[in-house]
Every structure is written in C-alpha cells, then in structure tokens.
Image (cartoon, grey):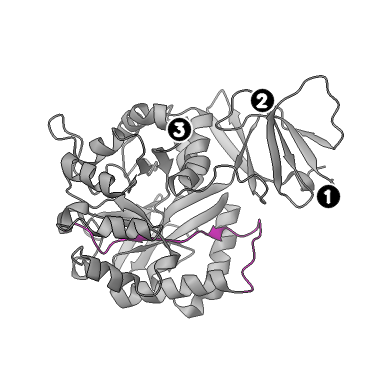
Amino acid sequence: MANRSVLIINAKVPGYNGLQQIQVDKDGRLEAIQPMVDGTAPSIPCLDVNGDWLSPAGTDLQINGALGLAFPDLTLNHHTRLVSIAQFLAEQGVAGFLPTLVTTSVERIQQALEAIARFNASAARRSSPDMAQILGVHLEGPFLNPQKRGAHPAEHLLPLTLDQVKRVLGDYAEVVKIVTLAPELDDTETVIPWLKSLGITVSLGHSQATAAQAQAAFHQGASMVTHAFNAMPGLHHREPGLLGAALAHPTVSCGLIADGQHVCPTMLDILVRTGRGAIAPPSGGLFLVSDALAPLGLPDGVYPWDTRQIEVRNGTARLADGTLAGTTLPLLVGAQNLVRWGICTADEAIALATLAPRRAIGLPEWAIGQIVPLLRWHLTEATQALTWQRFDPRQTN
C-alpha cells in the first residue's frame, strides 16, 4: 500500500451522515470523503474499518505547557524541548496546538513569542505526522479583570488599552492567533477591532462582563469565550452574563474543559444541551481544550509554576491555597469523558476535540489536498468506553 492511494471504507466521519469512504494518496494527503458506494469494485487497495470513526487528529487551542516546560518560560534555548513536546502531543493524538502564555511580564511574553516564531521559522521544523504543529500562540492575559484573574498573578495584569496591547505584542503580532481579554476593561472600544484587523481571534474570559458588555464585544469582532463557566460570572436568570450572551450568539465559539473539575459533569451536560444544535454548524458552537499545564506527561507531584508551586493530584493542579490552576490531562481525555458520562454521543465528542477547534480559528475541518494525521476511534457499547489510536492507512496491511 505504500506506493499507491488507499481507500478507507465503512467509516463513520464526524459531521457526515452514514458510512463514508475516504481516499488518501501515497503521501498521506486526503483526496476525498464520499458516501459509501455499494456494488462497485474499487480500483485501488481498500481498508475496511468496520464502522469505526475516523477523524483528523485533535487541535488544542489552550495548552500551557508539557513535559515540565511552561510555555511562558520559553527561550531561544528551548528548541529541542519544543521538538520533544510536539512529538509527545502527536503521540497523544494532537495534530496542532496553540502554546498558551498566561499572564506574566511583558519581557517574558515577548521572549516566549520570539522563541515560538523562531521555532516555526526554523528550516529544521518540517511538517511531520510524528510532530504536532504549532498553529500560533494563545495569549491568555495580561488584559484580565483582577476580580476574575484566578491563578494569574495580579502584579503582571495590565490595563486594556491599545497602547498596552501594542506594547505586549511588540514585533510578534503575526505569531499570535488568540488573545483572551476582559472586554469591560476597554472604555474606548478600540482594542477588539484592532486585534481583529490583524487576523487575531479575540476571546472573552477572566471577565466580569455583563451580557450587554459581551454583546457589544461580539459586535466589535470578538468571536470566542475562554474556558466556559470558569473565571466569569455564572449563568443567572436575570443577568445571563458573558456566557449567556455567548451561548445565545450564532457565531461565537465557547471552549470547555471536560476534566470533571473545572466544570462539574451536570453543568457540562447543560452546556452541551444548550449548544447541541451548534456542535457542527457553519460557525459558532462548542469546542474542547485541555488547559493542560507544564506537568502534562509527568506523574502527580509538586512542580514549580512561575514563582509559585502547584500540586498535581489525579491530573488536577492547584496552588497552595487551593486555587484551581489547571489540569494535566491530554485533550482527547475530555472527549472520552463526555461519552463516558453520557453527555455526548461519540460523534459529537470526537467533533468537539478535532473539527470544532479548527473551525473556531477559521481553519477547514477537513483539509482536502493536505496531509492529515488521522485517528481511528472505537466505541464499546457495553461500557461506553471510547478509545482511539493514531491511524495511517499506508502503514496498515
């Protein structure tokens, strides 16, 4: 099979109705996805996946580090460690990710942005199915509401003004893909339109915004919400707040963490039920993120976190005072949890980790004509256990 195109048959594909056949060329490029055709003998080798799901590998839009390296600590000396992280994430079923820089000093932010820009520009950095691709940077702060800063250090928060945003981005605006900010901090209403003009996705989070303030931000061009329910007012029947405004908006995407700690399964169920009609729309909807911290890939224990320490227990990281800092669970665990808890169908959960994040930042869900790392998913009906494996049909006999 190594020298010819391969036709994968009897595949379930998120976002498609019925069984599909997927053609992949000898280099791993996705050529076509079409409904199964009975009674026609294909002219190329076939691989029957017997009703399992096939999807692109995952895309993680919010990941703070891995293998002991926090992305805000990046320097030009970390090229080799970034390679190791990219390889590790590929093994975890992730094809693309946004290194997330949480609130820190302007100098450290720009140092990390330079390291990532150099890494992506390096001649040695080539597309490979064995390495997850850095799709850009998610800048989570420092333009956050102090009342909803969570684990972000107060001393590095900055006022949300156009001058301060330009100062933080410096010469590296082109590497930034998402900026999370609190819209109520901008009285001039100039920051969001300016960021959007640069092609940067603006996400609302760590915010006290009312529904009216959130709606105004969406009108200005914001199109995303960072880790729904966390670091924002809860839903209220008289003041729906930022999250309520987002869920009612047809083109706003909401990220969610499905580790069972950031949001309890009952509230995740409500969130998914509310957004179910928007799980696979042309735009908007829900998507999964890991929000994983630097100890991702390491055992539970105590680890440094900026100038503080975090303790990781059973995949959940907290500061010494108990403040939730994040998780150390990989992205695809969230999809498996949603199925195991009975919140999502397998089709929905897979889409939330693979197709929906790409759609949220304007990428095609299935990049026809490109090399697409694939995952094969299987659902054991008796236990509702959703499992996956990396899948290269060219290497399957």
Tell me: residue 373, above or below residue 246. below
- What residue is shown with label 1? 2
Which label belongs to residue 125? none
At horizontal 73% and vertical 50% (from top left) the residue drawn is 28
Which label belongs to residue 281? 3
At horizontal 24% and vertical 61% (from top left) the residue drawn is 143
On screen, residue 28 versus residue 178, left or right, reads: right
For mark 2, give the secondary structure.
loop
Which of marks 1 and 3 precedes in the sequence? Answer: 1
On screen, residue 270 versus residue 94, left or right, reads: left
At horizontal 61% and vertical 46% (from top left) the residue drawn is 367
Looking at the picture, how far across and down is residue 184, in whole percent? 17, 52
Residue 56 placement: quadrant: top right
Which of 252 and 315 lies nearest the eye of the viewer?
252
Q: State which quarter of the image contains the N terminus.
A: top right
Looking at the picture, how far across and down is residue 5, in whole percent? 81, 44
- What residue is shown with label 2? 19
CA separation in Å, label 2 and label 1:
25 Å
Residue 134 lies in the magenta-colored region: yes
**Which is closer to the viewer, label 2 or label 3?**
3
Which of marks 1 and 2 precedes in the sequence? Answer: 1
At horizontal 39% and vertical 43% (from top left) the residue drawn is 259
Tell me: residue 43, above or below residue 71. above
CA separation in Å, label 3 and label 1:
36 Å
For mark 1, give the secondary structure.
loop
CA separation in Å, label 2 and label 3:
20 Å
**Region rendered in magenta:** 123-145
Residue 212 placement: quadrant: top left
Q: Circles 3 and 1: CB distance less than 8 Å?
A: no
Q: Circles 2 and 1: CB distance less than 8 Å?
A: no
